[in-house]
């Protein structure tokens, strides 16, 4: 019970902190002081106090988009075990629901973007849909590898307990899987090298362009939803990359938080040392991620 | 079989994909050189120590890791090319074909009537996958130098298969194969320069036309 409460509190409160840490890491790399680590929280508070402007051409789809996206992402967060703790919600086959809740979230974001009737946002929606199509096989190959290794179709047994032994028995395939999942993590969260969350150079934007017409509280909801998505997919990655268990509940929660902070610093480092890929190169990179995951599946099926 | 060798073989197969997916010749050459070095290290890991093995390892690392890459790098600087333009099939499709071929190699290796000691090893599917990757590089790339790289990958695959038999393979045979390979690369280097001088490009598909 306490675990479930900590799970929900962490999922609700921690995501913007990750964005703050990524921003701070990038600032340190660039030799700047940077915004305070808590800046994303201030931004969210500011956006929630503002009023909203809605274009006359938009319908209810435009307003439903961010809300459904956040709801779907939060539901997905109940399915993922954080660290070595069981997820509050777990049943056989929940990995498919997990993957498609993000699909639903993406559908609503793109539908809201198309609802504005702006050709510019349509372009962003098309890009988002294309890259998501290519990232999905990589995610499913990875989940299939985990299902095979743990002999279960549910995320909680897949990610808790068995991963540490899998590192010893089939380290190569877990390593490939981790690489593939990291690429999926970056592309799903629109981070460099696939998309630059800070850019407003119109021709290269993917995610930012879709939310240009949103303002005020709804825009805050979008930003918060994106942070939660980063948190959930990051938890999936850290569960695999750093499987540890001391057995003491509180220490394990502490370790999980440290692992997430390390992941945020890692993403910040990747963003600082890499340039954004040309948009034609992105599908190549995603195909490579699919192949890594498929190869990993091949190794465990053998 | 020990796990370090298995990880190295997985690395060899990943390098196959790197060679298939890159358009830069310098990267492809370095990838193949790294593959050669890994193949040179492998015999020491899987067989017990002997001077025969040390000779093979040193010879392989010198030839595949240093000599052949430097010859190839020399060839690309002379011909002044840095990347493969317009392969017959694009990079992403070749990568996907490579992945399918690797999967087929695993399926095929499971069906092969091998000696009981060699059953279930990663060597056999990896060797077949590397061989097929070499073939794929040979047939899909247009530039003579990329085809040489494909030929090297092909040879690496054959060597990987031969690793199972290293104990039975005399040094002379090994040395002969390496010498052949180096002479082959040398001749190809000369041919590449000749083609680039005659046609001001090393696109081999032009060689199919009989007249200007």
Image (spheres, coloured by chain):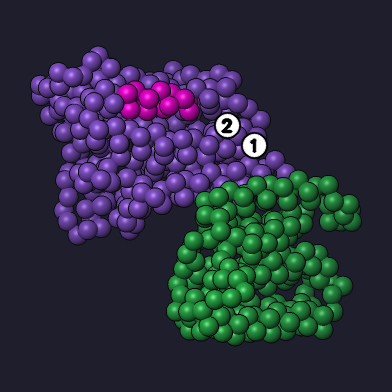
Left of A226 or right of it: where is A220?
left
Q: According to the rendering, which colour does chain A have?
A: purple
Q: Main secondary structure of the magenta part?
A: helix
Left of A219 or right of it: where is B27?
right
Bounds of the magenta segment: A98-111
Instruction: From the top left corner, tell me how far across and down residue B66 is, in percent.
Output: 58, 81
Left of A88 or right of it: where is A35?
left
Measure the C-alpha gap from mark 2 to mark 1. Answer: 8 Å
Which residue position is annotated with label 1?
A: A149
Residue at (68%, 61%) from the top-left corner?
B135
The chain ID associated with circle 2 is A
Residue at (21%, 53%) from the top-left corner?
A27
Residue A106 drawn in magenta: yes
Please tell me whether residue B98 is drawn above or below residue A121 in the rendered image.
below
The mark found on residue A158 in the picture is 2
Instruction: From the top left corner, tell me how far across and down residue A170 is, in percent.
Output: 65, 47
B191 or A105, nearer to the observer: B191
Q: Can residue A39 be spotted in the picture?
A: yes
Residue at (55%, 38%) from the top-left corner?
A142
User: Who's green, chain-wise?
Assistant: B
């Amino acid at each position: 019970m306490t675990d479930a409460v900590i799970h929900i509190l962490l999922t609700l409160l921690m995501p913007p902190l990750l964005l703050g840490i990524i921003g701070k890491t990038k600032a340190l790399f660039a030799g700047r002081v940077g915004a305070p680590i808590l800046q994303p929280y201030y931004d969210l508070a500011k956006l929630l106090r503002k009023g909203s402007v809605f274009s006359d051409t938009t319908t209810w789809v435009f307003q439903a988009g961010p809300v459904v996206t956040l709801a779907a992402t939060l539901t997905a967060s109940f399915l993922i075990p954080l660290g070595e703790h069981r997820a509050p919600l777990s049943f056989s086959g929940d990995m498919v629901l997990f993957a498609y809740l993000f699909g639903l979230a993406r559908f609503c974001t793109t539908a809201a973007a198309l609802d504005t009737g702006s050709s510019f946002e349509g372009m962003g929606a098309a890009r988002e849909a294309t890259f998501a199509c290519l990232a999905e096989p990589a995610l499913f190959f990875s989940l299939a590898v985990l299902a095979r290794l743990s002999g279960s179709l549910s995320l909680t047994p897949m990610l808790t307990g068995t991963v540490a032994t899998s590192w010893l028995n089939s380290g190569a395939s877990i390593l490939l899987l981790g690489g593939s999942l990291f690429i999926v993590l970056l592309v799903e969260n629109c981070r460099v090298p696939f998309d630059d969350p800070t850019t407003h150079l119109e021709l290269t934007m993917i995610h930012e362009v879709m939310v240009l017409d949103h303002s005020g509280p709804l825009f805050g909801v979008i930003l918060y939803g994106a942070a939660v998505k980063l948190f959930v997919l990051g938890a999936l990655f850290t569960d695999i990359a750093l499987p540890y268990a001391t057995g003491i509940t509180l220490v394990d929660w502490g370790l999980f938080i440290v692992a997430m902070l390390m992941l945020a610093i890692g993403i910040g480092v990747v963003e600082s040392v890499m340039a954004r890929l040309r948009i034609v190169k992105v599908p190549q990179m995603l195909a490579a991620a699919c192949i890594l995951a498929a190869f990993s599946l091949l190794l465990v099926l053998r | 079989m020990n796990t370090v060798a298995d990880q190295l073989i997985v690395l060899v197969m990943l390098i196959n994909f790197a060679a298939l997916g890159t358009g830069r010749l310098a990267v492809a050459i370095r990838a193949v050189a790294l593959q050669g070095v890994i193949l040179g290290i492998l015999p020491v890991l899987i067989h017990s120590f002997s001077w025969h093995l040390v000779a093979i390892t040193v010879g392989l690392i010198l030839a595949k890791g240093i000599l052949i890459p430097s010859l190839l790098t020399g060839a690309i600087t002379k011909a002044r090319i840095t990347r493969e333009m317009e392969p017959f099939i694009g990079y992403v499709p070749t990568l996907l074909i490579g992945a399918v071929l690797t999967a087929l190699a695993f399926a095929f290796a499971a069906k092969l009537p091998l000696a009981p000691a060699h059953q279930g090893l990663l060597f056999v599917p990896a060797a077949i996958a590397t061989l097929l990757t070499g073939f794929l590089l040979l047939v899909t790339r247009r530039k003579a130098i990329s085809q040489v790289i494909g030929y090297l990958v092909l040879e690496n695959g054959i060597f990987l298969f031969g690793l199972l038999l290293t104990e039975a393979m005399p040094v002379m045979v090994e040395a002969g194969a390496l010498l052949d390979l180096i002479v082959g690369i040398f001749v190809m280097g000369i041919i590449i320069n000749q083609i680039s001088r005659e046609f001001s490009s090393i696109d081999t598909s032009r060689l199919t036309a009989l007249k200007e």
